[in-house]
Amino acid sequence: MKWLWSVSLVMAGMVSPGLPTDASSPLRIVMEDGSPYYIPVSATVSSGSPIRWENPTPTHHTVTYNGCTEDQPHCLFDSGPVPPGGEFTIPGLPSGRYPYHCRIHPIMRGIVVVIDAHVEPSRL
């Protein structure tokens, strides 16, 4: 039944296909060399769920929260260079919208939307 509910929400365009069914399975985002660069470019996940970016490309990329600046000693998330075949995982984020980019290739942009894990499906 949970699977049918997830499929219904995806088909209705309410959540991204990468929405994990539980907090232990990571949302998977793949880096690409061509547009849209991060697949999915807009991903939705439940709060506290891990998020993993994978780099199958032959070049290095980063996953850097847009709020990060050079003069900040710490920022919400910044992978540093992710090598070809590498990945970057964060344990989860609180509810909110998190735009990010690649510092090496600034044209690469994506967004993670984190929804409250306790929201009833009918309220999405």
Image: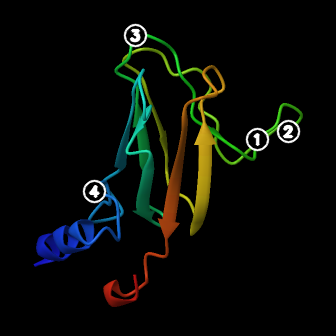
* Disc 1 secondary structure class: loop
Of residues 69 and 51, which is closer to you in this image? 69
Q: Position of residue 16 (x, y in %)?
A: 34, 59
- The label nearer to you, 4 versus 1, is 4
User: Who's the residue at 21% across and 67% down the image?
Assistant: 11
User: Who's the residue at 53% across and 50% down the image?
Assistant: 111
> Mark 1 — residue?
68
> Mark 4 — residue?
17
> Mark 2 — residue?
72
Disc 4 or 1, which lies upstream in sequence? Answer: 4
What residue type is disc 3 on?
Pro
- The label nearer to you, 2 versus 1, is 1
Callout 2–callout 3 Cβ contact below 8 Å: no
For the N terminus, the image quarter is bottom left
Q: Position of residue 32 (x, y in %)?
A: 39, 26
* Disc 4 secondary structure class: loop
Compared to residue 35, the image places residue 56 above or below, namely above
Distance of label 4 from label 2 (alpha carbons) = 33 Å
Disc 2 or 3, which lies upstream in sequence? Answer: 3
Callout 4–callout 2 Cβ contact below 8 Å: no
Disc 4 or 2, which lies upstream in sequence? Answer: 4
Q: Position of residue 92 (x, y in %)?
A: 51, 56
